[in-house]
Amino acid sequence: MARQYEAYPYPARDPGDEGKRLIVGSPSDPPEIDHFLFGGKRDWRKPFRALVAGGGTGDATIMLAQKLADAGAAAEIVYLDMSAASRKVAEARAAARGLSSIRFVTADLLTAPELGPFDYIDCTGVLHHLPDPQAGFDALSAALAEGGGMGGMVYAPYGRTGVYPLQAALAALTEGEAPEAQVEIAKRALAGLPKTNWFLANPHLSDHRASDAGLYDLLLHARDVPFDVPALLGALERAGLAFVSFLEPLRYDPARYLPESLHARAAGLDAPARMALAERLAGNMKTHVFYAAKGARKPAAPSPESRPRLNGLSAATLAAEIGRKGALRLTSDGLTQRLDIPRAAAPALALTDGRLRLGEIARRLGKDWLAFAALWAPAHVALTGFNLLRYSEGTR
Ligand SMILES: C[S@@+](CC[C@H](N)C(=O)[O-])C[C@H]1O[C@@H](n2cnc3c(N)ncnc32)[C@H](O)[C@@H]1O
């Protein structure tokens, strides 16, 4: 596997692109960390130590370091990866941006506790590749400070239907070959697959078309053991980590995939069983993005002091859409879902500018807190449910 990441640092990134854009995503965007792990109340002027475990070509490292530098936060970001080629790309990206808060370490993820303790750990796309994934979860847990938390991503089995038989087939065809030759053989095999092959029948997989590194990661990886919901929750629990939330939380509500006549049956299950059911019914989850913490934790909830921040959409556009239709439509991994938000919430959404607190929005609308909270509740559920809204003091 080490040979793979020297030949194909993943994901493929060009340091020359840093002048054009900042890649932002889940997990580990600071307002999202705040919302899920710190009750939306973290004071980002306080020192913040983060570890990016299996940092690859640097996406999470650069996002965190850049956003915290912009905020003038006293941050130290430790990038840890065993691949020297990946580190070279990540270092060049940091240099292109003049970021000085990153410490680069080339070592095994299992050494994380020696580098800790950390307020936050990002581990994205790594744990399912380890020879002993539980040892990885345990090491990250041991590296966290008391009260700290982590954001992670692991591959999930059902949305990757078709990947695993094809991985096994390509392993048989490419055994003993160098990575470049494996890619060339895989491309030829892919071009000639019969239309009955399950990989071809899965419309949600496209990494193999994006780059050779993507093809290698998806179809030629030497070790790739996905986690379904029960397996992931079990690994977190054994590591002494409390599960906080999946992203996006509403995708893990089985009622989204069942007729109304079966909602009560699903509601009778406990929370882990409901999330497992949702994954099995939806069929389109290729990964699980999650937050977990040292010690029980709940995502931020609305209060007069909460500062709501929209994610990726403007208050004016959202308010206009809700005012007109009383609903939003969102498509992820091939499935369009409808989010109902009462039209009466539109004026409140129009004031969600990232600066006003909910109490202030209520006052501006001439409502007492109880009346406002009732109006806001469906918008809160729908928008936080699809990660379109977070509560955070913000990094500025
Ligand atoms: C699929 S890439 C993901 C990179 C990055 N986290 C991202 O999401 O863009 C997996 C990375 O984990 C690293 N890795 C795998 N096993 C590791 C281990 N035991 N210790 C340190 N790094 C490891 C690989 O070198 C590779 O860079």
Image (tube, helix red, strand yellow):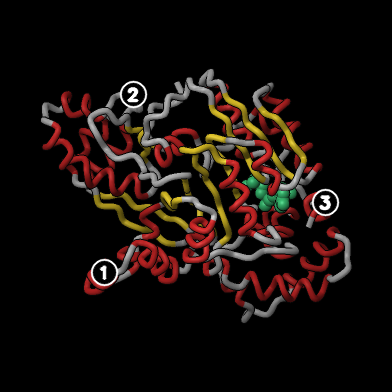
At x 33% / y 23%, what residue is drawn? Answer: 355
Circle 2: is it few (<14), some (14-19), or many (20+) Cα within 10 Å?
some
Q: In screen coordinates, is 148 left or right of 82?
A: left
- Residue 7, numbered circle: 3
Dividing the image into 4 quarters, which one contains the C terminus? top left
Q: Nearer the viewer, residue 58 or 146?
A: 146
**Amino acid residing under circle 1:** Gly
Q: Is residue 166 left or right of residue 154?
A: right
Q: Earlier in the sequence, mark 1 or mark 2?
A: 1
Dividing the picture into quadrants, the one containing residue 35 is top left
For the N terminus, which image quadrant?
Answer: bottom right
Give the CA distance from mark 1 to mark 2: 39 Å
Residue 389 position in % (x across, y down): 36, 40
**Which residue is under mark 1?**
268
Q: Residue at x 56, y 70 (%)?
A: 202
Q: Position of residue 295 (x, y in %)?
A: 43, 45
Could you tell me how far apart the alpha carbons at marks 1 and 3 are, in whole angstroms? Answer: 50 Å
Query: Where 278 sits versus 289, above or below?
Result: below
Pinpoint residue 74: horizontal percent, then vertical percent.
Answer: 56, 21
Given contact means CB atoms under 8 Å apart, are the residues at marks 1 and 2 in contact?
no
Tell me the number on the disc at residue 355.
2
- Label 3 near ligand 1 (CB < 8 Å): no
Residue 280 visible at all? yes
Going from the N terminus, do you reach mark 3 or mark 2 first?
3
Mark 1 neighbour class, 10 Å CA radius: few under 14, some 14 to 19, many 20 or more: few
- Local packing at callout 3 (Cα closer than 10 Å; few below 14, some 14-19, many 20+) is some
Closer to us: mark 1 or mark 3? 1
